[in-house]
Image: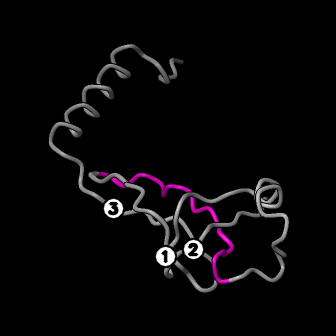
Amino acid sequence: MMQLFIQIENGMPINHPIVEKNFCEVFPHIDINNLPPEFARFERVLEPDPIDGFKFVHDGYSLVGEVYQDVWLTVPLTPEEIAEIAAQSNNIIQSGIGVSRV
């Protein structure tokens, strides 16, 4: 599993997570097994599966237990987005893509 780290300033994550190899190259003087308060471990949280009528928006990073993680907000789809999804679905149905004919 890839280890990630994130920089902390005034108790808040700044910048974006960095992979272990790059972290060690940029901060060779820091022991990853004994991180100073300016750094923390990070775990990537993938975007959740879709829910009808909603989308997920990445809202930054938050401390969960002892590691920082991605935060995803659930946001209702706009009427325009709902109409576009319906149009795309109709196009797929009309083109016969994914339709099994026996």
| Residue hosting label 2 | 8
- Frontmost of labels 3 and 2 is 2
Q: Is residue 38 above or below residue 81?
A: below
From which residue to which does the magenta span run? 37-52
Inspect the image, locate mark 2, and give the three-letter code of the amino acid beneath it: Ile
| Residue hosting label 3 | 74
Callout 3: helix, strand or loop? strand
Q: Estimate the x, y position of residue 52 in percent, counting from the top left.
A: 32, 52
**What main secondary structure does the magenta stretch of the protein show?**
loop
Q: Residues within 10 Å of mark 3 (few under 14, many from 20)?
A: some
Q: How far apart are the two marked residues, 3 and 2, measured between alpha carbons?
A: 26 Å
Please tell me which of labels 3 and 2 falls first in the chain: 2
Residue 73 part of the magenta-drawn span:
no
Q: How far apart are the two marked residues, 1 and 2, measured between alpha carbons?
A: 5 Å
Residue 45 part of the magenta-drawn span:
yes
Identify which residue is drawn at 54% across, 59% down.
15
- Frontmost of labels 1 and 3 is 1
Task: In this rendered view, identify the residue nearer to me: 11 or 53.
Answer: 11
Task: In this rendered view, identify the residue nearer to me: 53 or 80.
Answer: 80
Identify which residue is drawn at 81% across, 73% down.
30
Identify which residue is drawn at 36% across, 22% down.
93
Tag 1 near tag 2, CB within 8 Å:
yes
Q: Residue furthest top?
A: 95
Q: Estimate the x, y position of residue 65 in percent, counting from the top left.
A: 59, 86
| Residue hosting label 1 | 12
